């Protein structure tokens, strides 16, 4: 798939056997310039994976730019209004659509921003060189006072991304899953003429429809505390563990993600009785293949 210049896509890198090597953002900056953005725990691994798989007959330069940029995420229902106060750039949805990037200045600081967000809310990821990072942060915070801008902690971010079924590397996905198990089939196009690493194994494993599948889970007791590694039970038998869990303000309930074998198809989610073991007792917890917030 050709990625237009100034576009950003979410994608996967696969092993030869079709399982996931890593999930990344790929930004197309110019005719011959791309940036691969990895999760912080995967930077070196992803760099080495790319380096190993550069074709011998291709002229490609690969460098690690991790220390060259800082990143600020600005997200929320008032993000566009706030952003209009820090740049003269047209930030309308038509001029700056989702999954696009643009270069501009915030004050006297050059930045580039990607229109995307890990929260499920409208927002941008703003990349800045380290020498301007503190200045840009102060400009955004000062401008944001009139909009009620707040810093977001990891627990709040975790709740927002779980509500949207956004996955976290090391918890909800790892080197043992294949894309179809976690709802990421869209990143691997079978009809791509140029192919991709691990394509044959991916197609074969997809046809088999084996393995566990990622599900959303919601506890029926608001006061229960849900974290990862809590046992999930089907008809009072432990079948797997919660991969991520948090209290959701929008759902007024603990929510999470887990992997389950659904041999009976989708009907197994409604005909079986599910619960989660919390502090030594079973708490009823209906499951779904859909995200909590569309």
Image: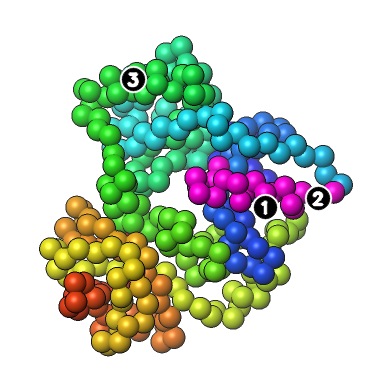
Disc 1 from disc 3: Cα separation: 37 Å
Q: Residue 131 location in percent, x, y?
A: 49, 19
Membership of 210 in magenta stretch: no
Label 3 packing within 10 angstroms: few (<14), some (14-19), many (20+):
few
Identity of the residue drawn at 55% across and 42% down: 37
Q: In this view, does 62 lie above or below 103?
A: below
Label 1 packing within 10 angstroms: few (<14), some (14-19), many (20+):
some
Q: Is residue 24 above or below residue 217?
A: above
Disc 1 from disc 2: Cα separation: 12 Å
Disc 2 from disc 3: Cα separation: 44 Å
Please state the extent of the stretch shown in magenta in the rendering: 37-56
Q: Mark 1 or 2 closer to N-term?
A: 1
Looking at the picture, tell me which residue is in the foreground, 88 or 43: 43
Residue indicated by mark 2? 55
Membership of 45 in magenta stretch: yes
Judged left or right of residue 119, residue 254 is: left
Q: Residue 103 location in percent, x, y?
A: 53, 24
Residue indicated by mark 1? 49
Question: Is residue 249 at least partly visible in the picture?
Answer: yes
């Amino acid at each position: 798939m050709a990625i237009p210049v100034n576009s950003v896509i979410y994608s996967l890198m696969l092993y030869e056997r079709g399982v996931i090597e890593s999930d990344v953002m790929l930004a197309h900056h110019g005719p011959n310039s791309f940036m691969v953005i990895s999760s912080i725990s995967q930077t070196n691994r992803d760099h080495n994976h790319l380096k190993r798989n550069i074709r011998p007959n291709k002229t490609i330069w690969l460098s690690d730019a991790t220390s060259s940029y800082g990143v600020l995420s600005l997200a929320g229902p008032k993000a566009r209004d706030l952003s209009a106060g820090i740049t003269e750039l047209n930030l309308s949805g038509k001029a700056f659509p989702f999954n696009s990037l643009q270069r501009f200045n915030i004050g006297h600081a050059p930045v580039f921003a990607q229109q995307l967000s890990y929260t499920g809310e409208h927002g941008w990821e703003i990349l800045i060189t380290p020498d301007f990072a503190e200045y840009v942060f102060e400009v955004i915070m000062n401008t944001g006072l009139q909009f009620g801008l707040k810093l977001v902690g990891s627990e709040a971010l975790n709740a927002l991304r779980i509500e949207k079924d956004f996955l976290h590397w090391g918890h909800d996905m790892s080197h043992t899953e294949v894309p179809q198990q976690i709802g990421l089939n869209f990143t691997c196009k079978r009809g791509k003429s140029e192919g991709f690493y691990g394509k044959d194994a991916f197609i074969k494993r997809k046809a088999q429809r084996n393995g566990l599948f990622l599900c959303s889970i919601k506890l029926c007791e608001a006061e229960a505390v849900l974290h990862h590694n809590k046992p999930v039970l089907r008809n009072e038998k432990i079948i797997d563990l919660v991969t991520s869990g948090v209290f959701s303000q929008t759902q007024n309930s603990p929510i999470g993600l887990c992997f389950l074998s659904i041999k009976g198809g989708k009907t197994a989610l409604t005909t079986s009785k599910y619960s989660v073991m919390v502090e030594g007792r079973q708490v009823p917890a209906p499951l779904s293949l859909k995200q909590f917030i569309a």
